[in-house]
Image: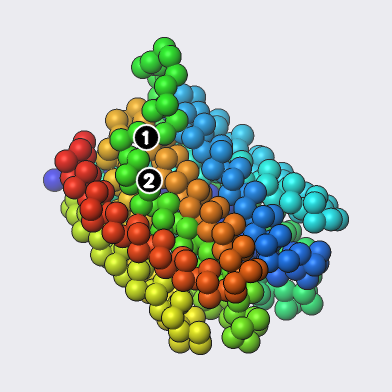
Amino acid sequence: MTEERLWNANYIKIWTVNFLVHFSFMLIVPLLPLYLNETFGATKDTIGLVLTGYAIMALTIRPFSGYMVDSFPRKTVLIICGVLFFGIFVGYLAAGSLAAFAVFRTLHGAPFGATTVAASTVAIDVVPSSRRGEAIGYYGLSNNLAMALGPALAIALLEAFSGNYKALFWVSLAASFIGLLLEISIHPPKRDFVPEKKVLSLDRFFLLDGWREAIGITCFAFSYGVLSTYVAIYGKEELGITSGTGLFFGLCAIGLILSRLTGAHALREGKVSRNASMGMCVSFFGYLLFAALHNPIGYYGAALIIGLGNGHMYPAFQTMFINLAENSQRGTANSSILTSWDAGVGLGVLIGGLFSEFWGYHSAFWTAWLVNAFGVTFYFLRIRSHFESNKLR
C-alpha cells in the first residue's frame, strides 16, 4: 500500500510561514531586555512588565482565534492576521520612547497569537490524517530552526551595524512580509461551515477536556519564559558572556531538532505519553543544571538538554490536545495549548523580572525549576492517565 504524502506543496508553504513568523519573533526577543536597558534605561522589573504585555495580548486573543479558525475560512483568517503581524513591526521602528515601544509590543501579541493558531490549524488540515502526529512533530522543526538562526543572526547584525537595533527590526519586517506572501499562495482544502451549536459556549474557545494538560504545559512554559527572556542579560552581567546568547539558543535548537526528528516516528506510532514523559524528565534535569551551575558549563549544557526535552514534550502535548478534541475543534485544541503556553511564558517573564530585580537572577532560575518540578509531578499524577482514558484517536 502506497504511503500518503506528507510533504505536499501546501504543507511546505505553511511550514515556511511558521518558520518566518517565529524567525521574525526570535530575531528580536532574546535581545529586547538589552535593547530596553541600553536605549531607554529600563530596569529589570520594568523590562518584565513591558515584555509581559505581548504575552498577555497573545493569551487574550488565542481562545477567540481558535473559534475564528473553526468558524470561518482559515486562509482568510490567516491572511488578515499576517497583515497585522507584518504592519506592527513598523511601530518598533517608529517608537521613540519606552511607553510607545510598550504599546506596540503589547499590540503585537494579538496578531502573533492569532497567526500561530491559524497556521498550525492549516498545517493539520493539509496533511493526511494518518500522518497527523508525525506532521505535528515536523511542523515544530520550523520553530526550532527559527530559534537557532534568529539569535545568531541578531548578534551578527548588531556587530555589523555597530549596535544599531533598528537593523533587527528591519529584517523582522522583511521576514514577516515574505511570510505574508506565502500565506496568500496556500490553498487549503475547502470546508463547508455548518454551525454545530447555536449558542456559543466556553468549549468553543477552550478545550475543556484538556484543562489538566493545560496546567502541565503552563508550568513548562513558565520555566522556559524565565530562561529565554533573561538568559542574555544574565550571561552578560554575571558570567561575562557578551556574545554567547546565539550559541545558547543554537544549542537549544539543536536539541529540539534532534528530539523532534527522533520523536516524530514514535508519535506516528501512538507513543504520545511515552514521548511526553521522557521529554519532561530530560527538561527537568536541564533546568536544574542551569539553576545550580553558575558557569558556562551550566549555561550551555542546560541549553542543549532543555532543547532535547522540550522537543519531545511539546509535540506530544500538542498531539494530546488534538486527540482529545473532535475534528470540528481542531482550532480550539491548537488555541488551547498555545493559550496555556502564553500564560506560562507571560507569568515567567513577569515573575522572573520581579525576582531578578529584588532577589537576583538565581532566585528566578530556581523558581523556574520548582514550577517545572510541579508540572512533571502533576503529569504523572493526573495528566497521563486522563489522556489514555479519554483520547479519541
Question: Is residue 41 shown above or below 66?
Answer: below
Disc ID at residue 175:
none
Please tell me whether mark 2 sits on a helix, a strand or a loop.
helix
User: Can you tell which quarter of the image residue 35 is in?
Assistant: bottom right
Please tell me whether mark 1 sits on a helix, a strand or a loop.
loop
Q: Is residue 68 visible?
A: yes
Q: Is residue 174 visible?
A: no
Question: Is residue 257 shown above or below 180?
Answer: below
Residue 376: x and y in percent read 31, 60
Quarter in which the C terminus is drawn: top left
**Hey, which residue is sitting farthest top in the picture?**
198
Q: Residue at x 39, y 62 (%)?
A: 372
Q: Residue at x 81, y 64 (%)?
A: 40
Quarter in which the N terminus is drawn: top left
Residue 182: x and y in percent read 56, 45
**Hey, which residue is sitting farthest front in the picture?**
358
Disc ID at residue 214:
2
Residue 262: x and y in percent read 28, 65
Question: Mark 2 packing: few (<14 Cα in 10 Å), some, or many (20+)?
Answer: many
User: Can you tell which quarter of the image residue 392 is in?
Assistant: top left
Q: Earlier in the sequence, mark 2 or mark 1?
A: 1
Q: Residue at x 35, y 27 (%)?
A: 328
Q: Report, in whole angstroms, how far the alpha carbon at label 2 lies from the one at label 1.
A: 9 Å
Q: Amino acid at mark 1?
A: Leu
Q: In the image, is 264 to the left or to the right of 371?
A: left
User: Can you tell which quarter of the image residue 78 is in?
Assistant: top right
Q: Amino acid at mark 2?
A: Ala
Q: Which residue carries the number 1 mark?
A: 207
Question: Mark 1 packing: few (<14 Cα in 10 Å), some, or many (20+)?
Answer: many
Q: Residue at x 44, y 46 (%)?
A: 340
Between 108 and 90, the residue placed more toward the observer is 108
Between 272 and 87, the residue placed more toward the observer is 272
